[in-house]
Amino acid sequence: MSTRSNPIAVFDSGLGGLTVVRQLMRRLPAESIVYFGDTARVPYGIKSAETVTRFAEENIEFLEAFAPKLIIAACNTASATALPRLDGKYTVPLCGVVQPGARAAVRKTRNRRVGVIGTEATVGSSSYTRCITELNPDVRVVARACPLLVPLVEEGRTSGDPVVRMVLKEYLKPLKDARVDTVVLACTHYPLLKPGIRAVMGPGVQIVDSARETARDAADILAASGRLARANTKAVHRFFASDHPERFAKLGKRFLGRPLGAVRLVQPELLNGHLALRVAEQG
Amino acid sequence: MSTRSNPIAVFDSGLGGLTVVRQLMRRLPAESIVYFGDTARVPYGIKSAETVTRFAEENIEFLEAFAPKLIIAACNTASATALPRLDGKYTVPLCGVVQPGARAAVRKTRNRRVGVIGTEATVGSSSYTRCITELNPDVRVVARACPLLVPLVEEGRTSGDPVVRMVLKEYLKPLKDARVDTVVLACTHYPLLKPGIRAVMGPGVQIVDSARETARDAADILAASGRLARANTKAVHRFFASDHPERFAKLGKRFLGRPLGAVRLVQPELLNGHLALRVAEQG
């Protein structure tokens, strides 16, 4: 049903998913993208699987009004907790960030010891561990929840900040002790702290950035079904947030690596299908 | 309309408001209390005044089903941003934590230099500064947003933790430089870090804990209108949360200073009045 020029829809609890959009833009410059960041209910990482699933459903129902050819949950928490429960519910293909990240980790590790860092909910769901050991049962996974990293990034701190350095040292200790040779950044905020993570883990350790892997997966899915946009298509990028659109545009620049343009306010939990369609038609 | 045995209703974005409940229980042991923590949408402190107001309205409408004689916004962000917009909307009296905290600060300062620490939204609203300078225009207020303190407390860290110590030193520097003699803890999570705050600020500086001041205010409001519960009343304490009731009960113990008992799950944004009433009738 979806045509080649239809957009790719992406949602996240907030800003982090823009790191996936950045990789999509780099890899698939002809694709139109509709992004929704649920900034009214951010963060998802400390919430239950039931609540995150309900939020994800509302976000997906809003994005469906744009007739997307693919919907990406660019949020590790939603990918890990909600996607398994929504499997088969929608006609539009859904993809998350866990599978691509897990696959890359299994491909990259030499000593079969992989570290995973993410939110409380992502680590609590054991999704990465399950996914990695399904791909290769010999891989040992050491997962660690790092609840402070998202607020540190959202406060604008970077790898050089002394608080960031101290916190990373503490969080990454069990991964270093287990001598992992690969670390999965299982949260879309973490790529912004890559230099600090690299500094703590040392030069021999490979970093898997789920955002990059997810963009590669999305390209593969679209290519396999003949739905990649034609090269000469003029891509349109639209951004929506459920709260603070100005703050979203301002902070989002760091995640996207370029200005976002206008960000529009929309509250999916207040929308029914008709209204969503009207928002979509208006732009 | 409300009788003396009706409950006091308290809401907060999450756990922090339990510090107000703790002070209410201490000061008013005969009062029944209904508490709602909006853990599905926590935190409020990074969200817009419009969004926080909408959340506060939904919370109040849920609590109204319990026929409370007083509703307390035990959340600095909601008190600072939503309450001024909801003035006069409800028949039940509403009170917040800003006025009591501001009054105590003005009463306590000797050198007329007051520091205020709180969330981004609370500090951004300038509510404390406005309220304090209305009470005494000669008082100079130095306000500082401390976005990491809530996640630090929620991760279970206390004043002795080296990350907490480093962060407090950084956040409190402008208050020390301005030589304030009084610091208002304008966030209900911060009393849990009081020893650390005291250590950085030094022994001459007074700490205003809004929770304690708010309980005092609530007692005054009820006494003035002859609605304090009779001394021999058997108080009933009920707790509701919009997500993760078990986590709420577990972490809540630290804030309340005692076990909470059963915490029930309720989602006010999904409730209409009838349903709320049914939840209330069931207990």
Image (tube, coloured by chain):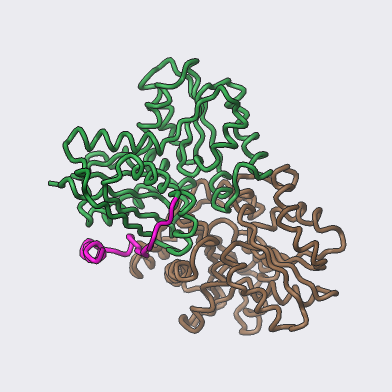
Chain colours: A brown, B green
* Residue A85 to residue A206: above or below: below
| Magenta span contains residue B263 | yes
Q: Would you place residue A187 above or below residue B42 in this image? A: below
User: Would residue B66 appear left or right of B132 to someone viewing this image?
Assistant: left
Is B21 situated above or below A215? above
Q: Decide if residue A212 is in sight here.
A: no
Could you tell me which residue is drawn at 71 percent across and 56 percent down? A171
> Does the magenta run of residues contain A29?
no
Q: In this view, does A119 lie to the left or right of B1?
A: right
Q: Give the residues in magenta.
A: B258-283
Closest to the observer, B227 or A82: B227
Q: Is residue B230 above or below residue A143?
A: above
Viewer-closest of A57 and B241: B241
Which is more toward the observer, A113 or A205? A113
Q: Where is residue B217 in the image (x, y as percent from the top left)?
A: 31, 34
Q: Which residue is drawn at 35% across and 70% down?
A: A273
Which residue lies most toward the front here?
B232
Report whether residue A252 is seen.
yes
* Residue drawn at point x = 78 percent, y = 77 percent: A107
Residue A74: % across, % down: 58, 66
Total count of labels: 0
- x and y, in percent, of residue B214 in the image: 35, 37
**Does residue B275 appear left or right of residue A273 in this picture?**
left
**Residue A79, x across and y down, in percent:** 57, 71
